[in-house]
Image (spheres, rainbow, N blue to C red):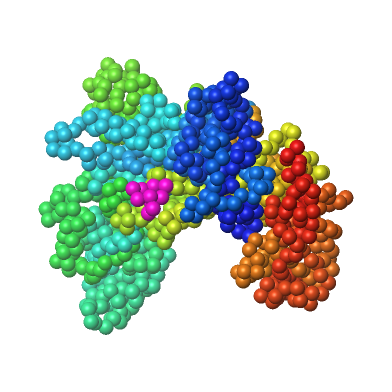
């Protein structure tokens, strides 16, 4: 056996050590003629062909023959009938052999194994009588080669498609949120798609009818920018909107294919040959249909109001297209506007009276049309030198600090009078830069005393609250800024042409200083919106746009939120206030690459044409020709029949829809319509995306669906966090901490530094993290995950290797005939299966992963399999003690394969394809989920015995370190238990006489004996602690103070002679007739094999 099996060192297979090896790493014992004989039973060679072979030949797996390639053995093909040396050989049970099997001639098998320096090792005459594991399931995953082979197997056998077509279960629809087709995938994409695949594969195992349609968002500025970046000179200069669209579509389609290849390499099952793309005519038509339903409901209107505007992109942006990077600082300004007409409350202090304001956007001062106050707050007039200022009472101290010059003491501002905010209403002031008067007005609760002066400079054309206040007072919607973020003529000759985010802002500050209105300028760190694509600051700017009136259906949207299951529940708390606070959704964009808003404007009046008839006609045109028709066809062709005759009076609009409207309509274009409305379902069972999508896709989908259909488009919404590096930092190219999933899977140029972990290791990482929050990944983390992967793989390899001669139909042992340890293991298996199933049902994959790994390591490798080796290797092949263990191993393997299949599909399928008996299904996924009903068995007793075993192992290790013993079977264990109940339990596991006797005495099942459990040749249960101390050196004992079991245990040298076959020490070794140096049990087993 090559490599390290998941077993403890002190209990390595005996014959491996007998041949001179210290662990399972020894290869020599497998290169024996006897080893091939057992494997040969699986091979059928025609009688005619057999004459061509001078000696017996056998099928053996390369994974158990590490030296096969070095010896020049030839591998068979992967076909169902591989040809080996010109001979037609039928693979075992006619099952697909994805791993090549190796034909070994007898002359190779006769070669004697050599040790170091070429010396021939002595072989035990009993070496060939041991039942060593045999399997074609390789220890090394070889993922870069093997995983694509398995994926090709799924494709050739149409496993995913057949599972859907043949399923009679209920539909399960996980609707895919479309990623942007604008670049390479990152580790966040891998997290997202793999989580979806976990769920879909689990639902398949549960018998659901699953069809996963992947999608891509193909419109919008991200793709348009990519195209523009690749153009230079004349190409860029001569670019028309139609040419841009053609280039953008080509770029998007190319990127889709690249991303698709990566997603498939992750092992994600989907309708890859039939994805949905938002640029496809059918999808675009469905989007127009959703838009039409919203128009019909009265939810779409055109208006002029301030919106998030990106000067760098020259388009309006939705909230979901903004980001708020850390470290932004604005030039904040304290200023004073001169009062020209005070209210009654201010008349006694009107001389040199000014209203103090504070703003983080000085460039908006030219658009100032009012100063707003909170009518409930207290305000005062304070005196500073010759100046009198109106300020909120609670901010007097803060203002005083701002008025202090460098190296000056903070002035004491004298309070002259006090009044409520409502008493300031109607006061007029003079604009410091323009010849106009404005009033102090009553604003809303957005005016607080957290910062500033408590009086808010109000420019209705540059802020949402300002706009709302302006509507209340009928203020003009002044916005003297153009698309590029430069001042227009309305801002005056001194400012026109200047950029509001740079020199224009500085110019306003300087003009305020010259006007005597400036009090203070200082940097102010705060969250400020940036264009998420260009990474540059945005502004609020009033423009003519198309809006969806969320206010019209907000109540319905909030009610729909209540019908959805949010995982985690905090998702509901995130999306609810976002919808509550949203009055409008700006859905128009001033870009070419997108789905057009199907509106026409009257050439003379500018009135829009947006009727049910006109929209439906455009929908039909787009369904047939795609949205390019809006730019390529004549206006008359786009107008409905009722308006074609006067086509010269109309012009088409040039705005496109917000890309969030694109993806937000996928419930109509995919979930509701796919496969003529029969393939999927609406509402979908689940939407699954990152936590940022509460303000993105989750919300846009909710709003369009509620507005058009009156219900949420999803039943459950599951969100995951972001992926950070190992230190918890956000990944960025500048920091050099970006993890490329392709490198994780395929490895880098230097495989030692960047090893190829494979897709399953990447998937195991996804299953190991609590995705409800941000997760971490890095090289060190992936190495740890890889170690866990190997433990699972090695354990499965050990399981299937020990089932090479097992036939479930003929060899299975009934439950009632199983020994206690086997019943206990099945009870543990049922528990872990229930834990895993509950974890999958609640989408807590990290819990499933933990449960599987804990079971594999703690219950299986460290205990059950460790104890089972004696009966698996040493027993006669048909001995009931061996068959009972194989019965359990088969159950364990079946359950583990089902449990890991959603998480590690390549590994699970690989094991399935190497199962040595005939199966009815081609794939592990066709076998379905496993449900067991075995009851828990004597859990308390086995827990007590395992605790004793842990204490014994501590003593064994101490004895091994001091060279008293080598293998654990060289030891005799002494145990004193002062607890009578526990002592009775231990006595129940102790049989009288030799456990190596043959035939066994009545009532002795040759399995549950404490000597087999502790892997010691003798176990003495003594009545006093002194007996332990006398028999064992103090260094080889475990005191009561340190013992986990409550027993005083110790280890001494075992008595008797060593059996050369099983390595147990016993006084009866050598007494069996016809066999030298073996115990009676082994003698009988050898004799049975000879027969």
Is residue 264 depicted above or below 826 in this figure?
Answer: above
Image location of residue 259, percent across then percent down: 38, 38
Residue that sits furthest to the bottom in the current view:
409
Q: Quadrant of residue 256?
A: top left
In this image, 952 relative to 763: left or right? Answer: right
In this image, 285 relative to 435: left or right? Answer: right
Name the image quarter holding the C terminus.
top right
Which residue does the image show at 62% across and 44% down from the upper left?
A: 133
Q: Nearer the viewer, residue 556 or 721?
A: 721
Image location of residue 32, percent across then percent down: 59, 42
Q: Quadrant of residue 165?
A: top right
Is residue 134 depicted above or below 1027 in this figure?
Answer: above
Q: Nearer the viewer, residue 801 or 448?
A: 801
Image location of residue 336, percent across then percent down: 24, 67
In this image, 701 relative to 732: left or right? Answer: right
Provide the residue span drawn in magenta. Answer: 747-756
Image location of residue 232, percent across then percent down: 16, 39
Which residue does the image show at 35% across and 67% down from the upper left?
A: 451
Which residue does the image show at 19% across and 38% down from the upper left?
A: 231
Q: Main secondary structure of the magenta part?
A: loop
Q: Nearer the viewer, residue 487 or 905?
A: 905
Residue 753 in the magenta stretch? The answer is yes
Is residue 40 depicted above or below 582 in this figure?
Answer: above
Residue 919 in the magenta stretch? The answer is no
Q: Quadrant of residue 346?
A: bottom left
Residue 606 in sight? no
In this image, 10 relative to 590: left or right? Answer: right
Which residue does the image show at 75% across and 65% down from the upper left?
A: 1055
Residue that sits furthest to the left in the current view:
493
């Amino acid at each position: 056996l090559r490599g390290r099996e998941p077993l403890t060192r002190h209990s390595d297979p005996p014959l491996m050590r007998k041949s001179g090896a210290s662990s399972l790493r020894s290869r020599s014992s497998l290169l024996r003629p006897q080893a091939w004989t057992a494997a040969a039973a699986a091979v059928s060679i025609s009688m005619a062909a057999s004459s061509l072979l001078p000696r017996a030949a056998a099928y053996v797996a390369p994974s158990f023959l590490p030296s096969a390639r070095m010896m020049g053995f030839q591998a068979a093909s992967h076909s169902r009938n591989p040809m080996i040396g010109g001979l037609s050989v039928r693979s075992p049970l006619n099952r697909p052999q994805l791993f090549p099997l190796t034909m070994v001639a007898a002359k190779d098998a006769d070669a004697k194994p050599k040790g170091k320096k070429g010396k021939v090792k002595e072989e035990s005459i009993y070496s060939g009588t041991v039942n060593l594991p045999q399997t074609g399931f390789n220890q090394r995953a070889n993922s870069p080669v093997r995983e694509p082979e398995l994926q090709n197997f799924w494709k050739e056998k149409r496993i995913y498609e057949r599972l859907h077509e043949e399923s009679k279960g209920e539909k399960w629809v996980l609707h895919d949120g479309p990623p942007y087709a604008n670049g390479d995938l990152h580790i966040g994409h891998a997290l997202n798609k793999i989580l979806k695949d976990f769920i879909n594969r689990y639902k398949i195992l549960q018998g659901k009818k699953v069809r996963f349609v992947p999608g891509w968002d193909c419109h919008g500025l991200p793709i348009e920018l990519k195209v523009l970046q690749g153009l230079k000179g004349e190409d860029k200069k001569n670019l028309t909107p139609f040419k841009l669209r053609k280039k953008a579509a080509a770029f998007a389609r190319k990127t889709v294919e690249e991303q698709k290849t990566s997603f498939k390499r992750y092992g994600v099952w989907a309708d890859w040959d039939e994805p949905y793309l938002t640029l496809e005519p059918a999808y675009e038509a469905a989007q127009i249909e959703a838009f039409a339903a919203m128009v019909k409901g009265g939810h779409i209107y055109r208006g002029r109001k301030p919106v998030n505007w990106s000067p760098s992109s020259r388009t309006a942006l939705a909230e979901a297209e903004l980001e708020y990077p850390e470290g932004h600082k604005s030039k904040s300004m304290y200023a004073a506007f001169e009062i020209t007409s005070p209210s009654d409350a201010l008349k006694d202090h009107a001389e040199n009276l000014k209203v103090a304001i504070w703003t983080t956007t000085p460039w908006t001062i030219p658009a100032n049309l009012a100063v707003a106050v909170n009518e409930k707050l207290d305000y005062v007039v304070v005196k500073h030198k010759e100046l009198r200022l109106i300020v909120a009472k609670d901010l007097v101290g803060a203002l005083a600090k701002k008025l202090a010059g460098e190296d000056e003491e903070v002035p004491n501002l004298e309070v002259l009078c006090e009044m409520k905010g409502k008493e300031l209403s109607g006061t007029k002031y003079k604009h410091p830069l323009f010849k106009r008067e404005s009033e102090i007005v009553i604003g809303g609760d957005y005016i607080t005393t957290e910062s500033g002066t408590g009086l808010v400079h109000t420019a209705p054309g540059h802020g949402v609250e300002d706009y709302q206040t302006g509507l209340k007072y009928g203020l003009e919607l002044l916005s003297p800024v153009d698309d590029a973020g430069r001042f227009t003529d309305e801002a005056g000759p001194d400012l026109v042409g200047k950029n509001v985010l740079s020199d224009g802002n500085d110019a306003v500050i300087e003009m305020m200083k010259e006007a005597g209105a400036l009090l203070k300028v200082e940097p102010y760190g705060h969250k400020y919106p940036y264009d998420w694509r260009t990474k540059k600051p945005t502004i609020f700017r009033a423009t003519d746009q198309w809006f969806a009136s969320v206010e019209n259906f907000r109540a319905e949207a909030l009610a729909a939120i209540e019908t959805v299951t949010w995982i985690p529940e905090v998702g509901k708390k995130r999306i609810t206030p976002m919808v509550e606070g949203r009055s409008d959704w700006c859905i128009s964009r001033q870009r070419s690459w997108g789905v057009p808003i199907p509106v026409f404007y009257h050439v003379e009046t500018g009135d829009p044409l947006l009727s049910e008839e006109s929209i439906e006609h455009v929908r039909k045109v787009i369904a047939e020709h795609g949205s390019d028709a809006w730019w390529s066809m004549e206006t008359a062709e786009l107008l409905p029949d009722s308006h074609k005759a006067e086509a010269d009076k109309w012009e088409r609009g040039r705005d496109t829809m917000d890309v969030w409207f694109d993806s937000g309509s996928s419930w109509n274009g995919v979930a509701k319509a796919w496969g003529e409305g029969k393939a999927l379902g609406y509402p979908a069972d689940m939407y699954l995306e990152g936590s940022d999508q509460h303000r993105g896709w989750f919300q846009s989908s909710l709003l369009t669906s509620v507005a058009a259909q009156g219900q949420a488009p999803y039943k459950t919404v599951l969100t995951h966090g972001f992926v950070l590096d190992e230190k918890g930092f956000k990944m960025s190219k500048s920091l050099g901490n970006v993890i490329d999933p392709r490198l994780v899977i395929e490895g880098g140029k230097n495989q030692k530094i960047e090893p190829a972990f494979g897709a399953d290791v990447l998937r195991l990482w996804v299953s190991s993290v609590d995705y409800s929050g941000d997760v971490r990944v890095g090289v060190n983390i992936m190495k740890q995950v890889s170690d866990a992967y190997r433990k699972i793989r090695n354990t499965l390899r050990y399981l299937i290797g020990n089932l090479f001669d097992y036939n479930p139909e003929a060899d299975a042992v009934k439950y009632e005939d199983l020994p206690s340890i086997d019943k206990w293991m099945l009870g543990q298996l049922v528990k872990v299966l229930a834990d895993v199933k509950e974890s999958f049902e609640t989408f807590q994959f990290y819990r499933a992963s933990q449960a599987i790994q804990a079971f594999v390591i703690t219950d299986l490798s460290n205990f059950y399999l460790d104890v089972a080796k004696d009966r698996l290797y040493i027993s006669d092949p048909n001995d009931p003690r061996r068959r009972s263990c194989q019965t359990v191993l088969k159950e364990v393997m079946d359950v583990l394969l089902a449990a890991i299949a959603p998480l590690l599909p390549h590994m699970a399928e690989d094991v399935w394809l190497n199962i040595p008996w005939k199966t009815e299904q081609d794939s592990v996924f066709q076998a379905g989920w496993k449900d067991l009903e075995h009851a828990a068995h004597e859990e308390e007793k086995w827990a007590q015995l395992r605790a004793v075993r842990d204490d014994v192992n501590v003593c064994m290790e101490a004895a091994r370190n001091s060279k008293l013993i080598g293998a654990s079977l060289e030891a005799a264990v002494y145990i004193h238990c002062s607890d009578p109940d526990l002592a009775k339990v231990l006595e129940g596991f102790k049989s009288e006489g030799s456990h190596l006797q043959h035939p066994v005495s009545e009532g002795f099942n040759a399995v549950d004996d404490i000597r087999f459990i502790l892997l010691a040749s003798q176990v003495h249960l003594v009545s006093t602690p002194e007996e332990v101390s006398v028999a064992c050196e103090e260094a080889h004992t475990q005191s009561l103070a340190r013992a986990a079991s409550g027993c005083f245990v110790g280890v001494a040298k075992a008595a008797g002679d060593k059996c050369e076959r099983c390595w147990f020490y016993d006084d009866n070794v050598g007494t069996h007739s016809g066999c030298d140096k073996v115990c009676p049990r082994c003698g009988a087993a050898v004799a049975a094999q000879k027969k």
